[in-house]
Image (tube, rainbow, N blue to C red):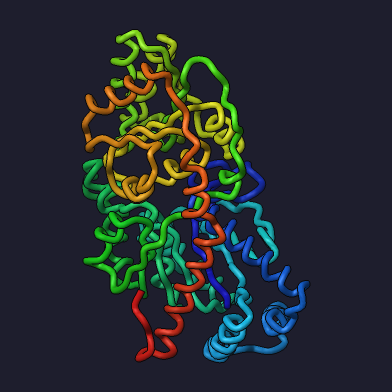
Amino acid sequence: MKIAFLTTDNRDAHRRYGDFQPYFGPAPTALLDGFRMLGEREQENEKAGNPEILKSGDSENQRDVAGAQETSTQERRAKNDEQRTRNKELGTVSPFEIHVISCTQQPLHAPEKLASNIWYHSLHVPKIGWLRTGYQGCIRAVRRKLREINPDIVHGQGTERDCAVSAVFSGYPNVLTIHGNMRSVAKAVGAKPGSFHWMAAKLERFALARTQGVLCNSVYTRLMVEPVASKTWLVPNAIRAVFLEPPPAIRPEGTPLLLCLGTISPYKQQVGLLRVLDALHQRGLRFAVDFAGSIDEESPYGVEFLREIRKAETAGYARYLGNLPSVDLIARLDAASALVHVPSEEAFGLVVAEALARNLRIFGFAVGGMTDIIQGVKAAELVPPQDWEGLEESIARWILNGAEKTGEAVEVMRVRYAPETIARRHLDIYREVLDSINHPTSSSGC
C-alpha cells in the first residue's frame, strides 16, 4: 500500500531556508515515527522467517522504482486485500510505504528518504501559487507528483495551509487530519474578511465537505467536523518518540519552574497569563516561568507580548526563550515542574500530553481536546475557560504546598499516545477507506 502524506515542511513555515534537513510539526512527526517503527517491525518479521509477507511488497517496490512494469491501482488494491488476509493469520503488518510531500516557496534540500519505508518529496511552488490563488500552484504541483507516485490513498495533514485542499483535489482517495480547527480559530482571533485565518476557515469547510473522511484528534474536534464531513474517526495525535523516553527520576530543587509552550498568538493568550504571573509575583510567591514558541514580532499581539515579557524579565520571574528545537524543549521540560496552557481554542493540546509524559503537572483551561488528555490523570488541574482568578489560585495553592512534582501520568501517556499504536490505527483507516471504494456494500462503520 502506498500512502501519500501531505504535510508542511516547517523550514518554509518558519522561513528557515538555510536548514539542511526538513522538519515537521509535532503531530505529523510523531505519526511518521510510528510509521517508521512499523516499517522496522516489518523488516524484523522478514528476518524472523516470514519472507513471504514482504516478498510481494518488495517486488512491487522494484517495479515502481525500475518502471519495468505498470500496475494499475485496482490490481494493487486486490493484492492488498490478499496481503491483509495473510497478515491477519500471521499477526503481522502489511507492507506499506509512505511518500511525504511538502510544498515550499523556495527550493530546498530534499533527502530521498526519511526512513527505510518513508520517501520525501519537496516541491518548489512560486509565491503566486499559494494562498492568494487558493493554493492553485500547490494543488497542481502535488497532482503532478502524485501521478509519478500513483498512491493508493492521499492523507492531507491539517487545514491550516495547502495540505487539505491539495488532498481533496488530488484525484485519489483521500482523508484529512484536523490539527487546528481553523473555523474556530478564526472566530477566536476575530479574523477579518480576506485575512489568513478567514481564508483558512473558508478553505477548511470546503475541504471537509469533499474528502472521504476526517481523522479527528479529540471529541471536541469531532463535534466541530461532523456537521460538514461525510465520515469521521476519533484518532488522537501521537506523542513524538523522543518525548516517551524515560524522564529523569529526580528534578533540580529550588525555585519552581513552570513552562508555557506554543506559538505566541491571541488565542493562546500568553499576555493574559503574564498578568496572572504578575499577580502571583505581587503576592510574594517564588517561581519562574519560561515561555517558548515562534512569534511574529511585527504583529500587534507579538509587540504586546514582547513588551509585557520584558517587564517580567526585569522583575525576574519570567523570560522568553524563542522557538526551541526538540532536544532543548525536552531539556526544559525535564528541568521544570509544571506546564501552564491557557488557549481559548484547542483542537487537541499535544503539548499537554508531551508535558505529562515528562512528569509535569498541568495548569490551564478546560477547553477542547485538553479534557480528553487529562481523563484519568490526577496531575492536571483545569479551571473553566477564562477563569483567570481560578487559575491564579490553583497555581498559588500548588506553590504554597511545596510545588510537588508528579510521575503518575507517564505510563498512561505512553500507552495512550504511542506512535506505533496511532500509526497502526491510521493504516486500519486507510484500508477501510479503500475497502469502501472497492466494495461499497461491505464497508463497515467505525
Position of residue 326 relative to residue 169, above or below, is above
Tell whether 429 sits left or right of 66.
left
Q: Which of the 4 image quarters holds residue 190?
A: top left
**Residue at 36%, 67% in the rendered image:** 233
Tell whether 345 sits left or right of 42.
left
**Residue at 59%, 27% in the rendered image:** 250
Q: Which of the 4 image quarters holds residue 18?
A: top right
Position of residue 397 relative to residue 216, above or below, is above
Position of residue 192 relative to residue 144, above or below, is above
Q: Which of the 4 image quarters holds residue 262?
A: top left
Q: Is residue 60 visible?
A: no
User: Where residue 242 sits: x, y (%)?
Assistant: 60, 45
User: Where residue 431 sits: x, y (%)?
Assistant: 48, 78
- For the residue pair 243 and 268, the one nearer the viewer reads as 243
Q: Is residue 234 visible?
A: yes
User: Where residue 386 sits: x, y (%)?
Assistant: 22, 33
- For the residue pair 337 and 267, the one nearer the viewer reads as 337
Tell whether 193 sits left or right of 137.
left
- For the residue pair 266 and 19, the one nearer the viewer reads as 266
User: Where residue 59 sits: x, y (%)?
Assistant: 72, 83
